[in-house]
Amino acid sequence: MSSSLAEDHIDTLIEERDGELYLSASEFPVFINTNEDYQTSQIDDETYQVTQENDSELRGHLEITFTINKRQDAWIVDQVNVNNLDQNSAKIDSDVQAEEEVLKALQLGESYQASYDGQEPPSEDYADQNLARIQVYEENDNARATYGWYYINMDNRSIYEYEVATNELTLIFQYENGSYNKVTD
């Protein structure tokens, strides 16, 4: 494995929050499973690509392409490209990704941050949905000012504004064709 690929794996599996290290809620990195079918293609004398389909509970149905290069006398996996073959590729895999998606949909400035606040639904009406609560805020040395509370559906990326006083959710964004679309009344 190349050093850049190893760094990508570390960045995917380990996250730092508030000076502490945490393991991300994700599956282990993908590898070639020699017990399953795969296709090999030669790019040049020192480069091959191996393509294999893989099913994963967290990631779904994937097509994975490994680029393998010869360096000195060893073959090194240099790059891994993953293509999600599922129709439902909107699934969110981690609390960090949920935070990022809410900020992306809201399109706020860089001074805004997001904080995952658990997956307890606001009421029994939403108990059957895979929702995560996200606080969006601005912070300085003296205080944290909450911009708003949101829920994001971890299965389809729909985003709801959460009204704390009434404990109600209002759908504000739907995720379609790779982008967020504002819901209008």
Image (spheres, rainbow, N blue to C red):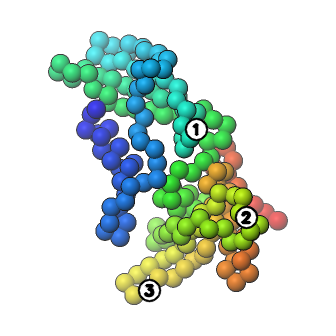
Residue receiving disc 1:
60
Asked whether the viewer can see residue 109, the reply is: no
Residue type indicated by callout 3: Ala
The disc placed on residue 143 is 3
Residue type indicated by callout 2: Tyr
Residue type indicated by callout 1: Gly
Quarter of the figure with residue 81: top left
Q: Which residue is drawn at 47% across and 16% down?
A: 39
Of pointers 2 and 1, the one earlier in the residue sequence: 1
The disc placed on residue 161 is none
Q: Residue at x 48, y 77 (%)?
A: 138
Of pointers 3 and 2, the one earlier in the residue sequence: 2
Asked whether the viewer can see residue 91, the reply is: yes
Q: Which class describes the residues within 10 Å of circle 2: few (<14), some (14-19), or many (20+)?
A: few
Q: In this view, does 120 lie above or below 73?
A: below
Of pointers 1 and 3, the one earlier in the residue sequence: 1
Residue 163 image offset from top left, x and y in percent: 69, 77
**Which quarter of the rendered picture does the C terminus lie within?**
bottom right
Residue 43 image offset from top left, x and y in percent: 37, 15
Residue 154 image offset from top left, x and y in percent: 61, 55
Q: Is residue 181 left or right of residue 83?
A: right
Q: Are marks 3 and 2 in contact (CB under 8 Å)?
A: no
Cα distance between the residues tagged 3 and 2 = 32 Å
Q: Which class describes the residues within 10 Å of circle 3: few (<14), some (14-19), or many (20+)?
A: few
The disc placed on residue 126 is 2
Q: Of the residues tagged 1 and 3, which is closer to the observer?
A: 1
